[in-house]
Amino acid sequence: MNFNKGKVKDFYLLTTDVENMFINEYLPGAPGEYVKAYLYGLLYAQLGIEMTHHAMAAQLGLSEKTLEDAWNYWEKMGVIKKLPGKDSGLLNFDIEYVNLRERMYGNFDAEEGAGPAAKKKATGEDKEILLYDEDLKKLFDRTELILGRPLSPAESSEIASWINEEGATPALVEAAFDYCCRRGKANVNYICKVVLEWNSRGLKEEPEIQEYIKNLDERQSIYRKILNSLGLTRNATQAERKMIDHWIDDLKFNMERIMSACDKTISISSPNLRYVNKVLENWAEEAHQQGRDVNQKVTVTQAVLNKYYEHLRREACEQAEKRRKEVYEAVPHIKEVDEKLKTLGSKMSRGVLTGMSRQQIDETRRMMNLLEEERAVLLTENNFSVDYTDIKYSCDKCSDTGIDENGNRCSCAKERIGEAEIWQKEKN
């Protein structure tokens, strides 16, 4: 790279323009050696004079590796671009300085209409997004009113990236600023997380955003109420919010039941949500087994329910015995038939144990079948149903035991619980 000697002696008398945006936003946080590289390169960029990276490193007293780190840093900050170069050695690229004002505010395009417009300019694979348009200006004005201070260029650039790169709507961004600032969270990095979260949920327009915020406020109120009931005055952690959401959204508990579970912590020394979670999960499992809604208050224990089933079976037997006596009074011969059936049944049972022959067993069974047929005829001739004297249980599937033939809780349990509650109260 050659330099014109006639001009070299003159450029010491000139000035190098450094944008105030660079000084305010980028210079304070940058390493000193990186600032040296930026300013020295800017001098040559404005003069249009070429210089090798090797020569520049020597002039600044830096290693080429440090110089490379500097350019990587400034590229990451968005103030320069590294372009394919002709240099040999470690730093084989050219440097193009970004016009920070244009990057921030875009440009006017007379051919496409008056006023600033957000556009994309592309050269090869490199694309620059111009961040400013009239809608963005209005958004910046509104966010500054919410914040109560002007936006910095870096903050404005960040906000514009949410619109241009993430696809967030101005309505969503403004709502996020208002929501966060009302909660004392005015940091743009924090607001960014909120914007991206809401945007991932597909929130776009004002009505749906406000509905979401309303539901969010209600859920926040629930978090506070639950924690306060445990004597905790802090905000819920992310894990705690997730746990509470599980109770409401997945297990379907209402607040009354959740607060009842919180009351259970009175008996422990250190009230915490994990204990409440265990209580609610146990309640949900019990409700599932008993076939009832999780929010149904249960005043009937399993022991009481078992006693009620026993009561139903006893009552069914008593009613059957009452009907049998009625039949015997109306048709005395049926009593004789029943006694014969009982005798034959006992004989067969003993015979099976004592080695009764197959022929004897078959003969006994034949006689019992004849008696059963005679009994059925006598009942129907006297206007009784064939099964009139049978035990009639409330549930045919479990015979009032609460357990079906597969060993599972019978589907009648839900109905029996309600009956058992009334039965228990009447007993007391």
Image (spheres, rainbow, N blue to C red):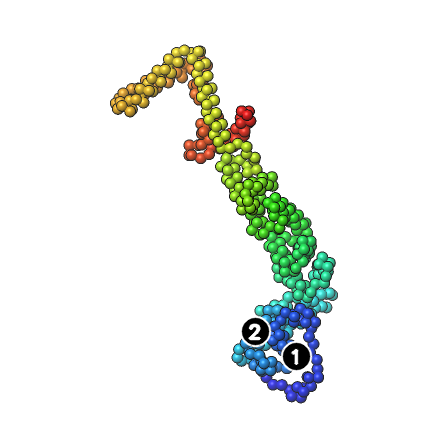
Who is closer to the viewer here, 85 or 315?
Answer: 315
Query: Residue at the location (61% across, 69% down)?
Result: 77
Q: Residue furthest front?
A: 269
Residue 385 disc label: none
Circles 1 and 2: CB atoms closer than 8 Å = no
Position above or below: 355 against 233: above
Q: Amino acid at mark 2?
A: Asp
Q: Is residue 404 visible?
A: yes
Return the x and y of residue 155 as percentages of the image width and height: 67, 63
Q: Which residue is mark 1?
A: 43
Quadrant in which residue 129 is drawn: bottom right
Return the x and y of residue 305 as percentages of the image width and height: 49, 30
Q: Amino acid at mark 1?
A: Leu
Quadrant in which residue 121 is drawn: bottom right
Who is closer to the viewer here, 5 or 178?
Answer: 178
Position above or below: 30 against 247: below
Position above or below: 391 against 144: above
Mark closer to the chain start, 1 or 2? 1
Badge 2: few (under 14), some or many (20 or more) residues near its Cα, within 10 Å? some
Query: Residue at the location (66% across, 65% down)?
Result: 154
Query: Residue at the location (65% across, 53% down)?
Result: 204
Residue 69 disc label: 2
Who is closer to the viewer here, 165 or 222?
Answer: 222
